[in-house]
Image (spheres, rainbow, N blue to C red):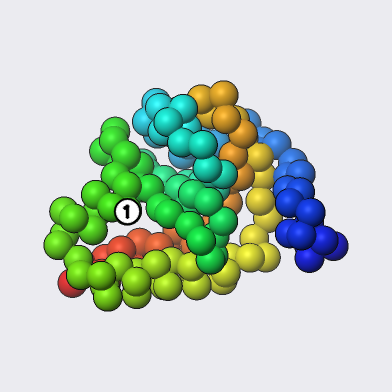
Amino acid sequence: MRFLDKILGSKPAYPPLPADNEAMVQLDEVKAPLEEFAHKVSDRLEVVPAAHEAFVFLGKPPGNFGLAWIHDGKVTSLKEFTQEHHLSQGQVERLLDRLGNAYQHASDTPRYSAEFGGKKMVVIPSKDLEQEMHQIMSNTLH
């Protein structure tokens, strides 16, 4: 069925994220920058909530995607992150490869839908994915 969904371009319908879910509490902490970001972006968004921050996959992970990191009340795009830390093209490619693999590792994680800034997005409440993404970002800088 997923194969046909990909061919036909349909998106799976995920259940709404319950208001009392820990992920919703985490997303409420970054609500303002998340909503502002959602208004600016036309791509599909998948959000990984974390304590006081969130990671946002844009596009079609694990293959063709971008990433934004919401932290400290602001949004840092992947491009800004790579420029700020002076990453080479090879480092960026390895970072994207590792982030895509992390996304795939969480493929069996239940997903939910939520709306922020008038835009419906997918929420992936996964501690394992959150930790793996932190590890990847940290390893990229060291």
Q: For residue 109, which quarter of the picture?
A: bottom right
Res. 135 in view: no
Left or right: 76 in relation to 101: left
Compared with residue 75, is residue 127 higher up or lower down, i.e. above or below?
A: below
Left or right: 26 in relation to 140: right
Q: Residue at x 46, y 36 (%)?
A: 41
Q: Nearer the viewer, residue 8 or 94?
A: 8
Residue of label 1 = 78
Q: Residue at x 56, y 44 (%)?
A: 44
Residue 114 percent across, percent down from the top left: 62, 35
Q: Quadrant of the C terminus?
A: bottom left
At numbered mark 1, what does the secondary structure look like: helix, strand or loop?
helix
Q: Residue at x 41, y 45 (%)?
A: 54
Q: Nearer the viewer, residue 134 or 127?
A: 134
Res. 45 in view: yes
Q: Circle 1: is it few (<14), some (14-19), or many (20+) Cα within 10 Å?
A: some
Q: Residue at x 30, y 63 (%)?
A: 137
